Each structure stands twice: as C-alpha cells, then as structure tokens.
Amino acid sequence: MGYVTPEQITQAKELDLLTYLQRYDPHELVHVGGNTYCTREHDSLKISNGKWNWFSRGIGGKTALDYLIKVQGFSFTQAVEALVGQNFSPLPHVSQAQPKKQEPRVLSLPQPSRCATHAVSYLHGRGIDYDLIDYCIQTGRVYESQKYHNVVFVGRDLKGQPRYAALRGTVGDFKGEAPGSDKRYSFCIAENPSANSVHLFESAIDLLSYATLLKMKGRDWRQDALLSLAGVFKQKKEFVIPLALSQYLKDRPGTNTLYLHLDNDEVGREAAVGIMKGLGDKYTVLDRPPPCGKDVNDLLQRKLGLTQRKEEWSR
C-alpha cells in the first residue's frame, strides 16, 4: 500500500475539478452555458462555481480529489498520488476570467514493475490469449505498474510517443487513466498499413478479446486495425464522435469502413447509433455488437467456458 504525506494531501485538496480538467483533460469538458460545464462521459455531472455535482448519482464535491475517488474509482492514496505524485508538476493559478490556454498535456505513466506476473495472470484469466499478451508486452502496449500491480494499456501517436494510458486493477474493480492521458490516442493495434477498415471497441480488454476470437478462428489478427475508444458516453441531441475515432480517421485517411463492436447496453447502443448517424454519409458503418453477453470479453469468456466456471465457484 502506498503512503502519502500530510503535505501532499493538503496540496491535493487545493485543486478544484474544473482547473484539473482544463489542464489535464480538456477534451472531457463540455461547456453547457455561462460558467457551467459537464463532462463528456457523464452529461449529468455538472461543474459550476467551484463545485461539481453528479445529479444522476446524487453525489458531488469541490475538488479533483473528490472526483477521482467518487467518480473514477481511485482509492484515496491513488488519487493523491495521481495529483501530487513525483511526476506531477504544480499548477499555476488560473483565473476563470482569462481565456483558456491550450497547453500540451504531459502524460504521467506509472512506474513499471520488473515483471508482469499479475498483469499476465489477470489478462489470461479474462480469456486473452497468451500470444496476444506477449505481443502487447513486447511492443510496449501493456505493462504492469510497480504500485498496486495495475495493468497499464498504453496508447501512442503516429510517432510512437505514449499519449494515453488506461489503468485496470488486477484485483477488484478499479478502472482509471494516468494523469495527462489524451483520449485521442487510445489503446490501438493497427500495424497493417493496407488496412482500410477499423474495428471499434469500448475498452482495451474488449479489443484484445476480439483479437483472441479471431485467433481462435485461425485468422491473423495482425491484419486488422483494432481501436479502443476509451469508453463511450450517453448521446444527447447532437451526435458526438469519440475523440479516439476522430483522431484515427484523421491520421489514416484511407479508412473507408467502420465495424462497431460496442456493448449491449443502453449507452453502447446509443453510441453506436450516434456514430452511424454522424459518419454514415462518409463511411460504411456496420453495427456488429457481440451476439450474446454484455460485451466482447463476456462473449469470449462464454465461448471459453470461463463464465460457467465462475458461476460454479460462486455456488
């Protein structure tokens, strides 16, 4: 378990949510009107007058620390370290009356562990094929963090520079992102330059699950372009294209077909409709949700009998 000092806690509590998002995740901010904002992921989470309130869940707070704990699922220590850890640069004072400056975000990757035993065990336990796990580790797409032993899924830009990192706990239900993550460059496997289509998923786990399913069918999964959208959010009246998809299409203008493998829940279905309506006039967009189960990983576990085993263990 990590340790944080009283001074670090005090510093972490001084950072309000709006300033944090403006500096480290501006693409998550949506201006509602006046001095009120919401987030793209949760449109009922409103930020105004130095406070935030997630109305659909009945929770709220003032600080970025509150947000990381209550919304993103960080532990108290993880949240403090994310805000004021050794790679954190102190924020300058930002006056809301001043125009926002588009400062380049700095990704703060967790320190890697010397081995990836926990990460490998977790991923294989979810049904991911060992060859895919080894490929991702060897190419630097996946590693295990030194603290907490989280699985870290790294997204890179076209120059190979790390720009995004999703964190997944190997124990419990922790999910998060490394500070400074840019959702435009989410976890992706797209090394075939001749691929003119892309398969889209809500998470890195679903992406790797689909690649495993292809391998089980005897297909070369490296020939397909696979992109995680780093989550999707409920659509409002206008249809918003996920940032990761917009950047992918900008970087790869030869793409003409999109395959949507989003979740079988309300948010996933609405996001699929939004993408089809928003891009259907420019691309061939095919909705291909998993034929059973909540998501692609659930489908994979059913095919491997892992779901049945878990049910038997819980009896």
Image (spheres, rainbow, N blue to C red):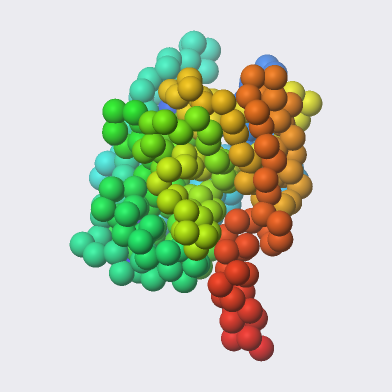
Quarter of the image with the C terminus in it: bottom right
Classify residue 50 as left or right of residue 280: left
Q: Quadrant of residue 307?
A: bottom right
Residue in front for this viewpoint, 117 or 78:
117
Query: Residue placed at 29% from the left, 64% from the top?
Result: 116
Residue in front for this viewpoint, 310 or 64:
310
Query: Residue 274, percent across and down?
Result: 72, 31
Residue in front for this viewpoint, 198 or 32:
198
Query: On screen, 11 above or below 97?
Result: below
Quarter of the image with the N terminus in it: bottom left
Q: Quadrant of residue 147?
A: bottom left
Classify residue 159 as left or right of residue 57: left
- Tag count in the figure? 0
Query: Residue placed at 52% from the left, 26% from the top?
Result: 255
Query: Residue placed at 63% from the left, 41% from the top?
Result: 260
Query: Residue placed at 24% from the left, 65% from the top?
Result: 115
Query: Residue 273, percent across and down?
Result: 74, 35
Residue in front for this viewpoint, 168 or 251:
251
Farthest left residue?
114
Classify residue 312 as left or right of residue 78: right
Look at the image and tell me whether residue 16 can be seen.
Answer: no
Query: On screen, 28 above or below 260?
Result: above
Query: Residue 67, percent across and down?
Result: 55, 45
Farthest right residue?
237
